[in-house]
Image (tube, rainbow, N blue to C red):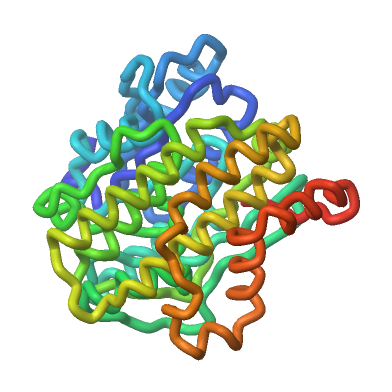
Amino acid sequence: MFRDKPSFSIIMPTLNSAVFIREAINSIASQTYENYEVLIVDSGSTDETLKICREFGDKFQVLQLLGSRQGRARNHGIAKAKASHVLFLDSDDKFASNQVLEMCKNTIREYSAEIYNFGVKFLRSGKVVKCIENKSNFRVDGSSELTKLALSGRFIHTIPWNKVYNRDFLEKNSISFPPLEEQEDMLFVLKLASTAKTMMFLSEVIVHADVRAESLSRALKEKNVTCCIEVFQTFKEWMSKKGFPDVKESDFNFYKLRTTAYLLLRLIYRVKSNAEFQVFFDKLTGELSDVRVSSFPFRMFLSPKFWFCILLAKFKIVGGFLRWFRPIFNPNFY
Protein backbone atom coordinates (compact mmCIF):
# COMPACT_ATOMS: atom_id res chain seq x y z
CA MET A 1 0.00 0.00 0.00
CA PHE A 2 2.90 2.36 0.81
CA ARG A 3 6.40 2.54 -0.64
CA ASP A 4 7.57 3.42 2.84
CA LYS A 5 5.68 3.41 6.10
CA PRO A 6 3.08 6.20 6.28
CA SER A 7 3.96 9.49 7.94
CA PHE A 8 0.56 9.87 9.60
CA SER A 9 -1.95 7.45 11.08
CA ILE A 10 -5.38 9.10 11.31
CA ILE A 11 -7.64 7.31 13.80
CA MET A 12 -11.41 7.74 13.54
CA PRO A 13 -13.87 6.04 15.95
CA THR A 14 -17.33 5.43 14.46
CA LEU A 15 -20.78 4.23 15.45
CA ASN A 16 -23.76 4.76 13.15
CA SER A 17 -22.15 7.79 11.55
CA ALA A 18 -23.57 7.47 8.04
CA VAL A 19 -25.22 10.89 8.09
CA PHE A 20 -21.93 12.80 8.40
CA ILE A 21 -18.93 10.49 8.00
CA ARG A 22 -18.61 10.96 4.24
CA GLU A 23 -17.70 14.62 4.73
CA ALA A 24 -15.10 13.69 7.35
CA ILE A 25 -13.49 11.09 5.06
CA ASN A 26 -13.61 13.42 2.06
CA SER A 27 -11.62 15.99 4.06
CA ILE A 28 -8.89 13.35 4.46
CA ALA A 29 -9.06 11.96 0.93
CA SER A 30 -8.61 15.46 -0.52
CA GLN A 31 -5.30 16.10 1.30
CA THR A 32 -2.45 17.19 -0.95
CA TYR A 33 -0.01 15.15 1.18
CA GLU A 34 -0.89 11.52 0.55
CA ASN A 35 1.49 9.47 2.70
CA TYR A 36 -1.02 8.57 5.40
CA GLU A 37 -3.21 5.72 6.57
CA VAL A 38 -6.69 5.96 8.06
CA LEU A 39 -7.81 3.54 10.77
CA ILE A 40 -11.58 3.62 11.14
CA VAL A 41 -12.50 1.78 14.33
CA ASP A 42 -16.19 0.87 14.26
CA SER A 43 -18.08 -0.06 17.43
CA GLY A 44 -20.86 -1.98 15.68
CA SER A 45 -22.66 0.29 13.24
CA THR A 46 -26.02 -0.91 11.92
CA ASP A 47 -26.51 1.86 9.34
CA GLU A 48 -24.57 2.57 6.12
CA THR A 49 -21.36 3.66 7.91
CA LEU A 50 -19.22 0.68 6.91
CA LYS A 51 -20.46 0.73 3.32
CA ILE A 52 -19.48 4.40 2.99
CA CYS A 53 -16.04 3.80 4.52
CA ARG A 54 -15.27 0.97 2.11
CA GLU A 55 -15.99 3.18 -0.90
CA PHE A 56 -12.71 5.03 -0.31
CA GLY A 57 -10.26 2.19 -0.97
CA ASP A 58 -7.53 0.34 0.90
CA LYS A 59 -5.94 3.43 2.45
CA PHE A 60 -9.05 3.66 4.65
CA GLN A 61 -8.88 0.54 6.80
CA VAL A 62 -11.98 -0.53 8.71
CA LEU A 63 -11.34 -2.21 12.06
CA GLN A 64 -14.25 -3.54 14.08
CA LEU A 65 -14.26 -3.47 17.87
CA LEU A 66 -17.81 -4.18 18.90
CA GLY A 67 -19.21 -2.34 21.88
CA SER A 68 -16.21 -0.05 22.29
CA ARG A 69 -16.47 3.55 23.39
CA GLN A 70 -14.35 6.26 21.77
CA GLY A 71 -11.41 5.91 24.16
CA ARG A 72 -11.04 2.17 23.67
CA ALA A 73 -11.50 2.58 19.90
CA ARG A 74 -8.70 5.15 19.79
CA ASN A 75 -6.42 2.89 21.85
CA HIS A 76 -7.08 0.10 19.35
CA GLY A 77 -6.18 2.44 16.52
CA ILE A 78 -2.91 3.45 18.21
CA ALA A 79 -2.00 -0.22 18.66
CA LYS A 80 -2.55 -0.89 14.94
CA ALA A 81 -0.93 2.32 13.67
CA LYS A 82 2.21 2.10 11.51
CA ALA A 83 3.06 5.79 11.09
CA SER A 84 5.54 7.85 13.07
CA HIS A 85 2.81 10.32 14.06
CA VAL A 86 -0.83 9.94 15.07
CA LEU A 87 -3.86 12.19 14.70
CA PHE A 88 -7.45 11.69 15.84
CA LEU A 89 -10.45 12.87 13.84
CA ASP A 90 -14.02 12.27 14.93
CA SER A 91 -16.49 11.08 12.31
CA ASP A 92 -18.58 14.25 12.56
CA ASP A 93 -15.59 16.61 12.22
CA LYS A 94 -13.31 17.41 9.30
CA PHE A 95 -9.89 18.75 8.47
CA ALA A 96 -9.88 22.53 8.09
CA SER A 97 -8.37 22.43 4.58
CA ASN A 98 -6.72 20.09 2.08
CA GLN A 99 -3.31 21.39 3.26
CA VAL A 100 -3.51 20.14 6.86
CA LEU A 101 -1.24 17.11 6.52
CA GLU A 102 1.22 19.01 4.32
CA MET A 103 1.44 21.71 6.98
CA CYS A 104 1.82 19.11 9.76
CA LYS A 105 4.63 17.41 7.85
CA ASN A 106 6.48 20.72 7.41
CA THR A 107 5.95 21.62 11.07
CA ILE A 108 7.43 18.31 12.25
CA ARG A 109 10.45 18.84 9.99
CA GLU A 110 11.00 22.35 11.34
CA TYR A 111 10.30 21.79 15.05
CA SER A 112 11.27 18.85 17.23
CA ALA A 113 8.65 17.94 19.84
CA GLU A 114 6.70 15.03 21.25
CA ILE A 115 3.32 16.74 20.84
CA TYR A 116 2.15 19.41 18.40
CA ASN A 117 -0.82 21.44 19.61
CA PHE A 118 -2.88 23.22 16.90
CA GLY A 119 -6.01 25.34 16.72
CA VAL A 120 -9.61 24.24 16.19
CA LYS A 121 -12.80 25.98 15.09
CA PHE A 122 -16.22 24.92 16.35
CA LEU A 123 -19.01 25.30 13.82
CA ARG A 124 -22.76 25.07 14.08
CA SER A 125 -24.72 24.96 10.83
CA GLY A 126 -21.58 26.06 9.01
CA LYS A 127 -20.98 29.17 11.17
CA VAL A 128 -17.99 29.53 13.50
CA VAL A 129 -19.24 29.78 17.09
CA LYS A 130 -15.90 29.41 18.86
CA CYS A 131 -12.25 29.34 17.89
CA ILE A 132 -9.33 28.02 19.91
CA GLU A 133 -6.01 29.08 18.43
CA ASN A 134 -2.60 30.34 19.40
CA LYS A 135 -1.57 33.82 18.29
CA SER A 136 1.95 32.66 17.45
CA ASN A 137 4.13 29.56 17.36
CA PHE A 138 6.02 28.73 20.54
CA ARG A 139 7.52 25.78 22.36
CA VAL A 140 7.19 24.79 26.03
CA ASP A 141 9.73 22.46 27.66
CA GLY A 142 9.40 20.52 30.89
CA SER A 143 6.66 18.31 32.31
CA SER A 144 6.00 20.64 35.24
CA GLU A 145 5.41 23.66 33.00
CA LEU A 146 3.15 21.64 30.68
CA THR A 147 1.21 20.25 33.65
CA LYS A 148 0.58 23.75 34.99
CA LEU A 149 -0.65 24.88 31.57
CA ALA A 150 -3.03 21.91 31.33
CA LEU A 151 -4.39 22.47 34.84
CA SER A 152 -4.94 26.18 34.20
CA GLY A 153 -6.73 25.58 30.89
CA ARG A 154 -4.32 27.92 29.09
CA PHE A 155 -3.18 26.75 25.65
CA ILE A 156 -3.68 23.04 26.43
CA HIS A 157 -7.33 22.09 26.06
CA THR A 158 -8.63 18.66 27.01
CA ILE A 159 -9.59 17.67 23.49
CA PRO A 160 -7.49 15.03 21.68
CA TRP A 161 -8.18 15.92 18.06
CA ASN A 162 -6.33 19.25 17.76
CA LYS A 163 -2.96 17.59 18.34
CA VAL A 164 -0.38 15.53 16.47
CA TYR A 165 1.34 12.87 18.59
CA ASN A 166 4.68 11.16 18.23
CA ARG A 167 3.63 7.51 18.29
CA ASP A 168 6.85 6.28 19.92
CA PHE A 169 6.26 8.76 22.75
CA LEU A 170 2.73 7.41 23.33
CA GLU A 171 3.87 3.79 23.30
CA LYS A 172 7.03 4.15 25.38
CA ASN A 173 5.13 6.02 28.09
CA SER A 174 1.99 3.85 27.91
CA ILE A 175 -0.20 6.89 27.30
CA SER A 176 -3.69 5.69 26.47
CA PHE A 177 -7.32 6.59 26.99
CA PRO A 178 -8.65 5.35 30.36
CA PRO A 179 -11.65 2.97 30.57
CA LEU A 180 -14.13 5.69 31.56
CA GLU A 181 -17.62 6.04 30.13
CA GLU A 182 -17.23 9.83 30.03
CA GLN A 183 -14.45 12.42 30.45
CA GLU A 184 -11.80 10.03 29.09
CA ASP A 185 -10.37 12.81 26.89
CA MET A 186 -9.74 14.94 29.96
CA LEU A 187 -7.61 12.36 31.76
CA PHE A 188 -5.79 11.41 28.54
CA VAL A 189 -4.67 15.01 27.89
CA LEU A 190 -3.72 15.63 31.53
CA LYS A 191 -1.51 12.53 31.61
CA LEU A 192 -0.10 13.46 28.22
CA ALA A 193 0.90 16.95 29.39
CA SER A 194 2.40 15.69 32.63
CA THR A 195 4.55 13.15 30.78
CA ALA A 196 5.74 15.12 27.75
CA LYS A 197 9.02 17.02 27.90
CA THR A 198 8.41 19.14 24.81
CA MET A 199 5.24 20.49 23.20
CA MET A 200 4.97 22.84 20.24
CA PHE A 201 2.04 25.25 20.04
CA LEU A 202 1.09 26.28 16.51
CA SER A 203 -1.19 29.05 15.29
CA GLU A 204 -2.73 27.07 12.43
CA VAL A 205 -6.22 25.58 12.73
CA ILE A 206 -6.33 21.94 11.63
CA VAL A 207 -9.87 20.80 12.53
CA HIS A 208 -13.39 22.11 12.07
CA ALA A 209 -15.48 20.51 14.82
CA ASP A 210 -19.20 20.22 14.22
CA VAL A 211 -21.40 21.24 17.16
CA ARG A 212 -24.53 19.22 16.44
CA ALA A 213 -27.91 20.02 17.94
CA GLU A 214 -28.37 16.53 19.35
CA SER A 215 -25.05 16.67 21.22
CA LEU A 216 -25.98 20.04 22.72
CA SER A 217 -29.40 18.93 23.90
CA ARG A 218 -28.60 15.50 25.31
CA ALA A 219 -29.15 15.13 29.03
CA LEU A 220 -26.23 14.74 31.38
CA LYS A 221 -26.38 11.71 33.61
CA GLU A 222 -24.88 10.65 36.90
CA LYS A 223 -22.02 8.92 35.08
CA ASN A 224 -20.81 12.31 33.79
CA VAL A 225 -20.44 13.53 37.35
CA THR A 226 -19.01 10.23 38.63
CA CYS A 227 -16.41 10.08 35.86
CA CYS A 228 -15.41 13.70 36.43
CA ILE A 229 -14.77 12.95 40.11
CA GLU A 230 -12.79 9.85 39.10
CA VAL A 231 -10.61 12.04 36.85
CA PHE A 232 -9.88 14.34 39.81
CA GLN A 233 -8.92 11.46 42.05
CA THR A 234 -6.94 9.49 39.46
CA PHE A 235 -4.90 12.46 38.29
CA LYS A 236 -4.13 13.53 41.86
CA GLU A 237 -2.74 10.04 42.53
CA TRP A 238 -0.81 10.20 39.25
CA MET A 239 0.76 13.52 40.24
CA SER A 240 1.70 12.18 43.67
CA LYS A 241 3.48 9.18 42.14
CA LYS A 242 5.39 11.18 39.54
CA GLY A 243 6.22 14.11 41.80
CA PHE A 244 6.04 17.68 40.51
CA PRO A 245 7.76 20.01 43.00
CA ASP A 246 7.01 23.05 40.80
CA VAL A 247 3.28 22.26 40.54
CA LYS A 248 1.50 23.71 43.57
CA GLU A 249 -1.62 22.37 45.24
CA SER A 250 -3.40 25.58 44.24
CA ASP A 251 -2.74 24.70 40.56
CA PHE A 252 -4.59 21.41 40.96
CA ASN A 253 -7.32 23.00 43.07
CA PHE A 254 -7.96 25.63 40.40
CA TYR A 255 -8.28 22.86 37.83
CA LYS A 256 -10.89 21.16 40.02
CA LEU A 257 -12.66 24.46 40.59
CA ARG A 258 -12.92 25.52 36.95
CA THR A 259 -13.84 22.01 35.76
CA THR A 260 -16.55 21.74 38.41
CA ALA A 261 -17.92 25.15 37.44
CA TYR A 262 -18.00 24.21 33.75
CA LEU A 263 -19.78 20.94 34.41
CA LEU A 264 -22.27 22.69 36.70
CA LEU A 265 -23.04 25.15 33.91
CA ARG A 266 -23.79 22.26 31.61
CA LEU A 267 -25.90 20.59 34.30
CA ILE A 268 -27.94 23.77 34.74
CA TYR A 269 -29.15 23.50 31.16
CA ARG A 270 -29.28 19.76 30.66
CA VAL A 271 -30.67 18.07 33.77
CA LYS A 272 -34.40 17.54 33.80
CA SER A 273 -35.35 18.78 37.27
CA ASN A 274 -34.19 21.09 40.05
CA ALA A 275 -34.01 18.13 42.42
CA GLU A 276 -31.67 16.30 40.08
CA PHE A 277 -29.49 19.40 39.79
CA GLN A 278 -29.26 19.65 43.60
CA VAL A 279 -28.10 16.02 43.85
CA PHE A 280 -25.41 16.48 41.20
CA PHE A 281 -24.34 19.81 42.71
CA ASP A 282 -23.79 18.23 46.14
CA LYS A 283 -21.87 15.32 44.66
CA LEU A 284 -19.58 17.48 42.53
CA THR A 285 -18.88 20.22 45.04
CA GLY A 286 -18.14 17.65 47.71
CA GLU A 287 -14.79 17.27 45.93
CA LEU A 288 -14.10 20.93 46.69
CA SER A 289 -14.71 20.68 50.44
CA ASP A 290 -10.96 20.82 51.15
CA VAL A 291 -10.34 23.71 48.76
CA ARG A 292 -9.87 26.98 50.68
CA VAL A 293 -10.34 30.17 48.73
CA SER A 294 -7.50 31.76 50.70
CA SER A 295 -5.07 29.12 49.35
CA PHE A 296 -5.07 30.63 45.85
CA PRO A 297 -2.40 33.17 44.87
CA PHE A 298 -3.41 36.82 44.83
CA ARG A 299 -3.16 37.15 41.03
CA MET A 300 -6.12 34.79 40.61
CA PHE A 301 -8.39 37.13 42.55
CA LEU A 302 -7.94 39.68 39.77
CA SER A 303 -9.64 37.36 37.26
CA PRO A 304 -13.44 37.60 36.73
CA LYS A 305 -13.36 33.98 35.55
CA PHE A 306 -11.93 32.91 38.90
CA TRP A 307 -14.68 34.72 40.82
CA PHE A 308 -17.38 33.23 38.62
CA CYS A 309 -16.00 29.72 39.25
CA ILE A 310 -15.92 30.39 43.01
CA LEU A 311 -19.49 31.71 43.11
CA LEU A 312 -20.92 28.89 41.00
CA ALA A 313 -19.04 26.04 42.65
CA LYS A 314 -19.27 27.22 46.24
CA PHE A 315 -22.77 28.71 46.42
CA LYS A 316 -25.73 26.56 45.43
CA ILE A 317 -27.96 29.62 45.22
CA VAL A 318 -26.00 30.87 42.18
CA GLY A 319 -26.68 27.66 40.28
CA GLY A 320 -30.33 27.82 41.32
CA PHE A 321 -30.54 31.41 40.05
CA LEU A 322 -29.05 30.45 36.67
CA ARG A 323 -31.42 27.48 36.37
CA TRP A 324 -34.36 29.78 37.03
CA PHE A 325 -33.25 32.22 34.32
CA ARG A 326 -31.81 29.66 31.90
CA PRO A 327 -34.26 30.51 29.06
CA ILE A 328 -32.70 34.00 28.99
CA PHE A 329 -29.05 33.17 29.66
CA ASN A 330 -28.13 30.34 27.33
CA PRO A 331 -24.37 29.96 26.72
CA ASN A 332 -22.76 27.74 24.08
CA PHE A 333 -21.08 24.53 25.21
CA TYR A 334 -18.44 22.55 23.37
- The answer to whether one can see residue 293 in this image is yes
x and y, in percent, of residue 334 in the image:
62, 51
Is 144 displayed left or right of 206 in the figure?
Answer: left
The residue shown at (42%, 39%) is 227
Q: Is residue 111 above or below residue 22?
A: below
The residue shown at (32%, 81%) is 139
x and y, in percent, of residue 316 in the image:
67, 53
> 111 or 249, which is in the foreground?
249
> 311 or 147, which is in the foreground?
311
Is 293 displayed left or right of 269 in the figure?
Answer: left
Q: Quadrant of residue 106?
A: bottom left
x and y, in percent, of residue 112 in the image:
22, 75
> 319 or 108, which is in the foreground?
319
The residue shown at (31%, 49%) is 233
Q: Is residue 79 above or below residue 149?
A: above
In the rendered image, the quadrant that contains the N terminus is top left
Residue at the right extreme of this rendering: 328
